[in-house]
């Protein structure tokens, strides 16, 4: 989380947080990392694109049994 926070201090990095269909968010979900997920969701564009690739983040979290991640994603209106 400290590394992510440091990287997000760089404006260009934050502006690209949704690159590759919100890959950073999707990878956080694949790893079941709620802290990283929550940090990324503080970026408006990341939250707005949380349903990238046909809601893949929610699908993966559900399949992997990451209940806390699923519940967090379900708090997003678009999901």
Image: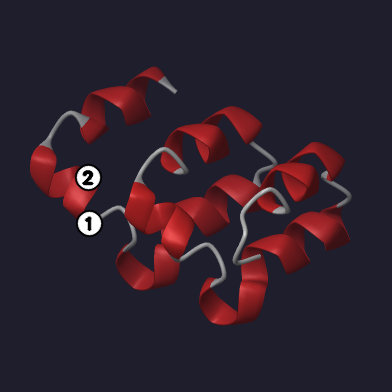
Q: Is residue 65 left or right of residue 44?
A: right
Viewer-proximal residue, 5 or 44? 44
Q: SS for tag 2?
A: helix
Which residue is rendered at x = 41% and y = 72% of the image?
21
Residue 31 lies, with reference to residue 59, above or below; the image says above
Residue 4 lies, with reference to residue 57, above or below; the image says above
Which residue is rendered at x = 78% and y = 50% of the image?
70
Which residue is rendered at x = 18% and y = 52% of the image?
15
For label 1, count other residues whose C-alpha is less than 10 Å away and answer few (under 14), some (14-19) or many (20+).
Answer: some
Q: Mark number for residue 51?
A: none
Position of residue 36 measured from the top left corner of the image (x, y, whole percent) = 52, 34
Q: Quadrant of residue 67?
A: top right
Quadrant location of the C terminus in the rendered image: bottom right
Quadrant location of the N terminus in the rendered image: top left
Residue 69 lies, with reference to residue 27, above or below; the image says above
Q: Mark number for residue 16?
A: 1
Which residue is rendered at x = 30% and y = 65% of the image?
19
For label 2, count other residues whose C-alpha is less than 10 Å away and answer few (under 14), some (14-19) or many (20+).
Answer: some
Position of residue 59 measured from the top left corner of the image (x, y, whole percent) = 76, 68
Viewer-proximal residue, 49 or 16? 49
- Please tell me how many numbered marks the rendered image carries: 2
Instruction: Find disc 2 in the rendering and name its residue.
Output: 14
Q: Residue furthest bottom?
A: 54
Gap in Å between the C-alphas at discs 2 and 1? 5 Å
Tags 2 and 1 in contact by the CB under 8 Å rule? yes
């Amino acid at each position: 989380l400290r590394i992510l926070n440091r990287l997000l201090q760089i404006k260009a990095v934050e502006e690209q947080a949704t690159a590759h269909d919100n890959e950073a968010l999707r990878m956080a979900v694949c790893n079941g990392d709620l802290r990283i997920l929550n940090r990324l969701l503080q970026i408006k564009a990341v939250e707005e694109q949380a349903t990238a690739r046909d809601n893949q983040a929610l699908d993966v979290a559900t399949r992997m049994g990451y209940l806390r991640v699923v519940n967090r994603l379900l708090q997003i209106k678009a999901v």
